[in-house]
Amino acid sequence: MKDYKKLIRKILTEVVESEKFDAALIAKYYHQNYRQIVNGITYDYQKFAKHIHDLKSTLSDVKLTFSHIIAEGNAVCTVHYSEGTRENGNRVKAKVIAYFEFSNDQLISCEEMAQIIQDG
């Protein structure tokens, strides 16, 4: 069985922590039918890719810290923190609780609650 805990850590680290937007990396790890719900807002694959692109243009030095990762079958739940620097130099930190599902080793869905816990 695939180690989805290891894979989710790899995917999020490569996609979120990289300094530049990489559409090929998103295509590698995210299914074309990917759906993500963040704080009640739904993103399809294209909107998700644009969201990542927009984050890359407004944040730098992004780092993730995982406090919990639980996997069962093709599903993974994480509690992690995302920290970065805004264009104006302010540091921002968010706490993220997310439930992911995989299909053929690609992410197919995510339900996420994110809360900004530091901004400035």
Image (cartoon, rainbow, N blue to C red):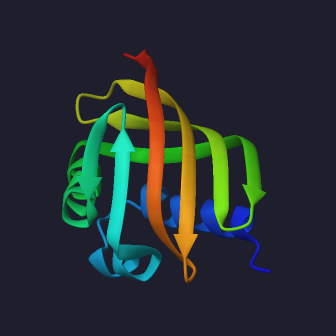
Question: In front here: 46 or 95?
Answer: 46
Query: Which percent across, then down, holds residue 33?
Result: 32, 72
- Quadrant for residue 46, please give it: bottom left
Q: Residue furthest front?
A: 73
Figure disc tally: 0
**Point 53% across, 59% down: residue:** 12
- Quadrant for residue 68, please give it: top right
Query: Which percent across, then down, holds residue 51?
Result: 24, 51
Quadrant where the image shows the N terminus: bottom right
Q: Residue furthest right?
A: 1
> Is 9 left or right of 36, judged from the image as shown?
right
**Point 44% across, 59% down: residue:** 109
Question: In front here: 90 or 21?
Answer: 21
With respect to residue 68, does 17 lie above or below?
Answer: below
Question: In front here: 21 or 28?
Answer: 28
With respect to residue 12, does 57 lie above or below?
Answer: above
The answer, for residue 43, to whether it is visible in the render is yes
**Point 23% across, 28% down: residue:** 88
> Is 30 left or right of 69, judged from the image as shown?
left
The answer, for residue 13, to whether it is visible in the render is no
Query: Which percent across, then down, holds residue 52?
Result: 29, 55
- Quadrant for residue 53, please give it: bottom left
With respect to residue 30, does 55 lie above or below?
Answer: above
Quadrant where the image shows the C terminus: top left
**Point 65% across, 48% down: residue:** 77
Query: Which percent across, then down, holds residue 66?
Result: 68, 44
